[in-house]
Image (spheres, grey):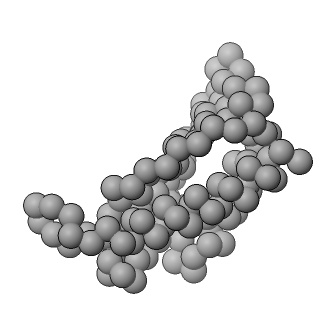
Amino acid sequence: MAKYEDRFSGDFEKFLESFNDGILSGSVSASYEDGSDYCENGIRCAVRVYERYSFTGSGRVSLAVTIIGNGSNIFVSAITTGSSKAVFFKVNTLGESSFLQNTIDVIKRCKEIANK
């Protein structure tokens, strides 16, 4: 499992839309699996789950993303998991690390979009 978290300022809706587009266009095998949206007292929460095929791990890798917005303050947490073929411990985490690095690159680009 690999994790990345970040806090920044910007437009929640712009970030969410550009993030979704960035993840799906970042890999030919990427797919949107499901999501959930919640809003209360001006606080927004979006949870998104994606998958993609990992050639290095020869299996599917999952990405779970939680995005919290409070005014212009945004918090994002991205966690990847999967593709290891070991029974009792993880042997190959290259697929997770690769998917997370792509996600970090997308987050950095989307932060700029959210600040325009």
Q: Residue at x 48, y 67 (%)?
A: 99
Give how far across and how far down residue 91 sits, in percent.
21, 70
Compared with 22, 26 (above or below) is: below
Give how far across and how far down residue 6 sits, in percent.
59, 42
Q: Residue at x 53, y 44 (%)?
A: 5
Q: Residue at x 69, y 38 (%)?
A: 8
**Can residue 31 be spotted in the picture?**
no
Q: Residue at x 81, y 53 (%)?
A: 113
User: Of 27 and 73, which appears nearest the observer?
Assistant: 73
Give how far across and how far down residue 10 sits, in percent.
78, 39
The single residue placed furthest to the top in the displayed view is: 41
Q: Is residue 55 left or right of residue 26?
A: left
**Can residue 56 be spotted in the picture?**
yes
Give how far across and how far down residue 109 sits, in percent.
73, 59
Q: Is residue 56 left or right of residue 63?
A: left
Q: Is residue 106 left or right of residue 9?
A: left
